[in-house]
Amino acid sequence: MNPLIDKLRAAVGAANVLTEGDLGAWEQDWRRRVRGKALAVVRPGSTAEVAAVVRACAESGTSIVPQGGNTGLVCGGVPDESGTQVVLSLQRMTAVRAIDRENLTLTVEAGCILQSVQEAAEQAGLLFPLSLAAEGSCTIGGNLATNAGGTQVVRYGNTRELCLGLEVVTAQGEIWDGLSGLRKDNTGYDLRQLFIGSEGTLGVITAATLKLFPRPAASLTAWAAVPSMEHAVRLLELAHARLGSGLTGFEVMGRFALSLVSKHFPQQRVPFAGESPWGVLLENADHESEAHARGQFEGLLEAALEQGLVTDAVVAENLAQAAQLWHVRESIPLAQAQEGLNIKHDISVPISRIPAFCEETDALLAREIAGVRLVNFGHLGDGNLHYNVQAPEGADGPAFLREQEDRVNDLVYGQVRRFGGSISAEHGVGALKAQSLPDYKSPVALSMMRAVKQALDPAGLLNPGRVVRI
């Protein structure tokens, strides 16, 4: 008999404390990089139950790994191999608590799937703009814990900018109700911002009040072929000037990344396949009319053609065509996985310096590792690239990772630092980058981060070993 397990069963019900059977859905990360062993997987159904679980674990000195949809990419939401940690799954907490149309806010529980949040907003005639490939399975609590980005950051910002309030269970098992929908509240430190992006290391997010927006009258998508990354950046500058706040998405995709989609998903039609070094996907949301939006888009692309920024372009004629274009972009990570194991980088660099970063880093990797293949794509509109490295064709993928991952990371992260960037733009730090963080974060920043961790979680029981190591 384990006294802690008994307390957990009393708190959430025996059926919601899992200790036997296949727990791989909670113990293994989405990329299948690591698999841990949990003492138990606990699934509370309310904030009060979360608080009871945290108090029980705190009393016994048992560390907790908060988990949402387990779609993270940095191994930050799964237990270690000790078999002593409790996985606290928020997946049962899915309620939409309130919609305030006049205040343009939506309050939901942390386990609510992102797609369900989008649908709840749509049913109210409004828009929740956070959008990413995993939206059918990731949870809003996880999005907040990692400060997720996605495809519309250029207009609406990261998840941090979309949140007005939080409900959080502290490391001591107390409940902080900060679900205010206020846009102005200058009564001291903004505690909400501490928990957003903290990856469950400071507290457990149980609910959030989110910003909603009026739905645009029209949303159009275009695909442009561009001859270089430099041309893509200049196209972005022109798009800002021509579309203003209507520019909601600006994605860039390298030729090799798109070739993997054609190779592994031949049923998909990749525009201008093999004809151009880069493809750019643009989205224009307009609050006037579709005719106005189309006129703006066509004017932008005509100017871009005249200036030599693009070599060809197409504007989707309907929602189905737009969805097909976005599906190509969203299929790149899946196609890369089909091609074999790879080394992922989620980096940000000042937009003006991205062309030089790519040129120099491409050459550096080609020089240092013969035959290496670069899968470069991402959110150029906000300076975020998924600068991924694929093993040479025909190489042993697992062996490539074992032998080259540290070397590749050192090369790429060194370049990121040299260009004034960040080694984690939207995926978080997790366990995968926690050891590297001190090499790329200032000692003063790390000292302040450790002080915050020590103040809010002095026993170090919340997601230990992730983000900042004490």
Image (spheres, rainbow, N blue to C red):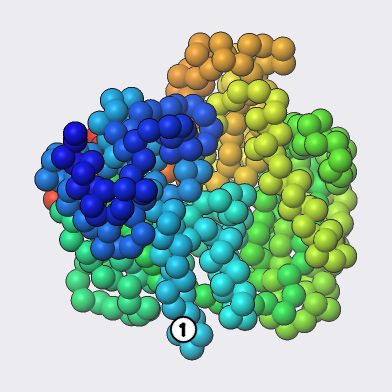
Image point 79% across, 52% down: which residue? 325
The answer to whether 321 is drawn above or below residue 439 in the figure is below
Name the residue: 26% across, 48% down.
Answer: 9
- Residue tagged by mark 1? 100
Q: Residue at 39% x, 53% y: name it.
A: 90
User: From the viewer's perspective, is residue 298 above or below residue 263?
Assistant: below
Quadrant including the N terminus: top left
- Location of the C terminus by quadrant is top left
Give the left or right position of residue 291, taking residue 218 as reference: right
The residue furthest bottom is: 102
User: Residue shown at 83%/78% (left/top)?
Assistant: 291
Quarter of the view holding residue 431? top left
> Residue 88: in sight, yes or no?
no
- Callout 1: helix, strand or loop? strand
Identify residue type, mark 1.
Asp
Residue 222 location, quadrant? bottom right
- Nearest the camera: 394 or 108? 108
Q: Position of residue 441 (x, y in %)?
A: 32, 38
How many marks can you see?
1
Q: Quadrant of residue 40?
A: top left
Q: Position of residue 48 (x, y in %)?
A: 26, 63
Picture coordinates of residue 180 (x, y %)? 33, 77
Decide if residue 246 is on the left or right side of residue 113.
Answer: right
